[in-house]
Image (tube, rainbow, N blue to C red):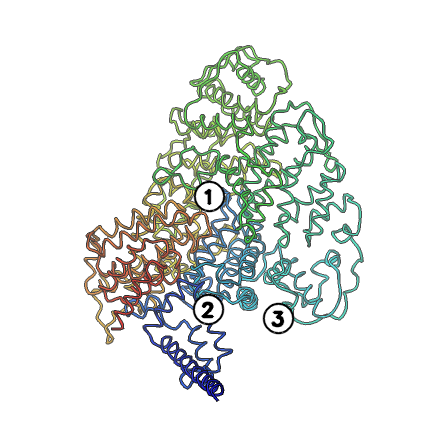
Amino acid sequence: MEIDGHANYSEKSNEHNETLKNANTVMAIDIIGKLLQNKGTSRILFLARHNLPTHWISFIQQVQLLESNSLALRNSKTLTPEALLKLTIDNGTVLSRETSSLQKFLAVLTFGSLASSAGLCHGASRSALWLPLDLVLEDAMDGYQVDAISAIERITGLIKTLQAINGTTWHDTFLGLWIAALRLVQRGRDPIEGPVPRLDTRLCILLCITTLVVADLIEEEESAPIDETECGSTNHWKEKEVSGTRRNGLVSSLQMLGDYQGLLAPPQSVISAAHQAAAKAVFFISGVGVGSGYFECINVKDMPMNCSGNLRHLIVEACIARNLLDTSAYFWPGYVNGHINQIPHGVPSQVPGWSSFMKGAALTPVMINALVSSPASSLAELEKVFEVAVSGSDDEKISAASILCGASLIRGWNIQEHTVHFIIRLLSPPVPVNYSGCDSHLISYAPMLNVLIVGIASVDCVQIFSLHGLVPQLACSLMPICEVFGSCVPNVSWTLATTGEDISAHAVFSNAFTLLLKLWRFNHPPLEHGVGDVPTVGSQLTPEYLLLVRNSHLVFSGNIVKDRNKKRLYAAATYSSPQPVFVDSFPKLKVWYRQHQACIASTLSGLIHGTPVHQIVDELLNMMFRAINRGTQSLTSVTSGSSSSSGPGTEDNPLRPKLPAWDILEAVPFVVDAALTACAHGRLSPRELATGLKDLADFLPASLAGIVSYFSAEVTRGIWKPAFMNGTDWPSPAANLSNVEEQIKKILAATGVDVPSLAAGGSSPATLPLPLAAFVSLTITYKIDRGSERFLNLAGPALESLAAGCPWPCMPIVASLWTQKAKRWSDFLVFSASRTVFLHNKNTVFQLLKSCFAATLGLNPTPSLSNGSVGALLGHGFGSHFCGGISPVAPGILYLRVYRSIRDIVFMTEEIVTILMNSVREVAFGGLPKEILEKLKTTKNGMRYGQVSLATAMTQVKLAASLGASLVWLTGGLVLVQSLIKETLPSWFISMHRSEQQEGSEGGMVGMLGGYALAYFVVLCGAFAWGVDSSSSASKRRPKILRTHMEFLASALDGKISLGCDGATWRAYVSGFVSLMVDCTPNWVLEVDVEVLKRLSNGLRQWNEEELAMALLGSGGIGTMGAAAELIVENDL
């Protein structure tokens, strides 16, 4: 009985404990529910969720386990399992900002979907979200500047920034990207002729670069770690994307792209390719099987009538080639029209082309021409060509090199990234296994190397390599070629079997050296314009800088595995050498480069009588001026101001000296100096000078670099007498100088800039500085043909830079002389002359900037620009071949082609801020002058006539800020952005502004809009320069500048700094800047000192911005969680 009683008691005790346990469980569940439902405690829990993701994930897992297994939860009368799970997942409005002062501003941050196609080219529409992208893409079309950084990397970073700042979906983001790239193509569908990038470069951006950007973004999402703990605490829950979001956004954006027919019309040169892409889809959906060889056998006329293609068909094919889409795209509604039942008759079954080549057909001349003129359609075809280039016979290697540099490079958009990499690999051939020669192994590859170098020397090809980020690697591949062939005595030549052309070591060197010089601004002074003690990015394009960038591609890290673009660059860098390469590895190149720098920096000196260099100078002068030296006195006895050259020479020897190219280049500056001095002293006529310089350039085309270097330096010294361009001694520009002046005025008509008269001197002939006159006389001796193109592409930018640095009107005179020589380049030359107007007067640059803002905002009185937005800023093309002839060039195009030549860019930030605030004022007053508005009566609703609604004004303000930020970033890059935030802005806020004191009753409205404009402007500037995350190398510089600026804000809020600006402007700026940081760039908040964040929060609370203050603390990481929790509790109480 005792035992039974004890057992019964234990059983009852267990039942009682179980009952208590269940009751406690129910109570705990109810408490959890109440905690999550209570506004205050839920906010505190969200702080943990926001800043302690690892702990929160563990908590969520326990809740999910409870939800699936707890009987007590299912029996709860106050909380269901579904409701509990929803409370833990739902972000709610824990850190939302609903303060009235920010509602209007934050509502403008998201425009929604893009507008109609009509608004994309004209008018201020939602397409303005992507204005920075339009500017960056058009900026890449400047042929005078190559970029060491891949356009893929730059555009990818910009897309991430704009997507984060604008808060758009990936559908809208990709649609904006495609539309911006299409606008770029349409602006250049009928380009002017000249040494500038043409349509091929624009199509490369649309069909290759943009597609690679999208591919990288999609792979980044799909390869991201699933475990949140791998992402770190900076990945906020609200930003977490569902896998496949970006790919789905791509599909939907391309489907909607079909609605923009005006942008999809293919230029004349790609109509056939577009029709083939459409025909491919028609055959597929019709079930008619045709191989790739079929399209090699037909032309446009043979295709079915319903196979009319456009640029969208080419975009889709580029995406399919990179596995971004599959053939289901062919079935999209409206993608193609109709079906086909059978293959058209009368089509030959086999013709020379890629299909027959892959089947084993020999590389006959007919086959080679076919492969050169049509692009490869797959990587396998390129790989087979590359195999021939590596292991084939010498003739086959030359043929393979020609094929790779043909249509596959220019128009092979689906495989272009592979083509440029194969070319880079061939430019750095490995040492053969059985090679035992004492000379470099590169000499045996001379014919193939020369074909490759000549094949990629055009402006468009150089820009294509630049867009792919391969300029540093291209420079690294060219340097050893220059070093080797420049050291060879030209006593050996090679005959190209394909053309019968004989090439020498001089020819290979000259072609390689000329191409190498195009990769940096070699003719500019070493110390260019800059901010503080740091030169701008453009001036850092030196051989050392290019090699440093190339060496950085060798750094292997975890980021490379995740970044497709970095993997491509890493692979390209390792082909030539897996080790870092420095200029010291090329002693001959280094000696020339040091001499080149010395020549630009100071007057020429160092030629000593009797030295080998002196002897070479004599030989070259005798070669150049044989007829003159047969007279009574040798030209070489003339003593110049900076060199002395005397001696008997070899005047009766008609043979050209057999000297290594590097030795000749060392002597070239002294030769040119002696010749120019002789001309100045009357010993040499201008015609004889030009003929002699042309003989030198023909003997060694690379000597053009030394000529450019010398003339660029001497024209700045001001020691040479002017040359009278009278048509007797020197060529005369009089025949069309007045016509050039009229055309310049037409080009600049939209800017309001006054063009100085070219006839200021009355009837006196035009003059040029003697070095400039000599150089222009030399350049006009070149024929405008393919053989001279690569050398004119080097001399042209140097000539313009040299003329632009001389007093007005030197460049128009040069343009007048050149238009007589090359009439089809007339538009290009006149446009180049018009750019120099802005280099002689700061006020013209300020006026140009004002025109950019006025055109973008629709404040321009010019009818063609009054609609505003992208179309008014960048225009729709330019040239005399357009209807109506030469027309005003859009101000944005002018600025993008001018800003790199502006030496003093320090003042640009102040000017842009000033214009931005003036634009905000104009927007607030509806574009009407204030004196007119004062006379107008107030309407019933209290709004003055001409004023705009707040929503419209905020949209315009955002557009103005976006333009300003883009211009600052493009003009000076990271350095200028940091100068803006660190120096210009604090100074602006501290200073008094008279215009703000004169606003009257509208002052508060204008001040608020101005503050929001500045906030958006500054955040965009920082995001462009640093990125919104920490993936870029530039982001490492962000914390220091950001902390300085936030300390300034906190100190001003604390009352430690007296401000001179309008109070409404200051309050709107601080609120807008903080809100944008919290909403769009939360990683930035984590880089600010905790104490500074607390001080900012206190200042915001004094303005009754409680929600914003809490949001700031909530985003500040673990260090500010306590202060945020205290604020939450205080508010609830």
Report the residue marked by disc 3.
Answer: 332
Residue type marked 1:
Val
Q: CA distance from mark 1 to mark 2?
A: 41 Å
Q: Quadrant of residue 1126?
A: bottom left
Q: Secondary structure at mark 1?
A: helix
Q: Secondary structure at mark 2?
A: loop
Give the image location of residue 352, x and y in percent. 77, 51
Give the image location of residue 440, x and y in percent. 66, 28
Q: Quadrant of residue 919?
A: bottom left
Residue type marked 2:
Ser
Report the residue marked by disc 2.
Answer: 113
Q: Which mark is residue 845?
A: none
Q: Report the front residue among 977 and 787.
A: 977
Residue 872 is left or right of residue 706, and the answer is left
Give the image location of residue 973, x and y in percent. 41, 46
Q: Which mark is residue 830?
A: 1
Q: Report the front residue among 1094 and 626.
A: 1094
Residue type marked 3:
Trp
Q: Secondary structure at mark 3?
A: loop
Instruction: Identify whether 763 is placed above or below 1054.
Output: above
Instruction: Identify whether 1128 is placed above or below 157.
Output: below
Q: Nearer the viewer, mark 1 or mark 2?
A: 2
